[in-house]
Amino acid sequence: MSELAETVMLGAAGLVILMALVVFYRVATGPTTQDRLIGVNVIGTSTVIVIVFIAAGLGRPEYIDIALVYALLNFLLSLAIARFTYHEGRVE
């Protein structure tokens, strides 16, 4: 991969990290539980995207396996939290 492509990939990863920081504000101050849950899910998805960009930028395809496992864990965590909040009656 060319040096320009590596720079673009790592720069895109940096922008996604900045986006995740903005979403973190919503997680911290969200008025409802649903806002916080969606924010946490967006941060988890952003983490997967950053790992993939880093894998592409550094030429390390083994990092994509880590991203896939993290995406699966993020999905399972979202299901568990949704089920817990539904059974606890905290759905607003």
Image (cartoon, rainbow, N blue to C red):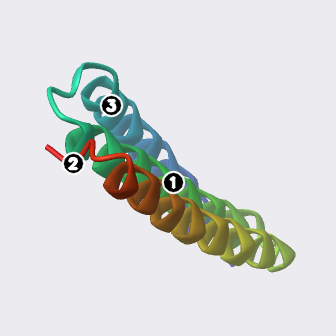
Q: Amino acid at mark 3?
A: Val
Separation of marks 3 and 2 at Cα, in angstroms:
16 Å
Which mark, residue 92? none
Q: Residue furthest top?
A: 29
Report the quarter where the C terminus lies: top left
Q: Is residue 31 left or right of residue 22?
A: left
Residue 3 in view here: no
Q: Residues within 10 Å of mark 1 (few under 14, many from 20)?
A: many
Separation of marks 3 and 1 at Cα, in angstroms:
12 Å
Q: Is residue 70 left or right of residue 86?
A: right
Residue 76, percent from left and from top? 58, 69
| Element marked by disc 3 | helix
Q: Amino acid at mark 2?
A: Val
Earlier in the chain: of badge 3 and badge 2, it is 3
Separation of marks 2 and 1 at Cα, in angstroms:
21 Å
Which residue carries the number 2 mark? 91
Residue 89, percent from left and from top? 28, 47
Which residue carries the number 3 mark? 27
Q: Residues within 10 Å of mark 2 (few under 14, many from 20)?
A: few
Residue occupying the point 67% across, 60% down: 54
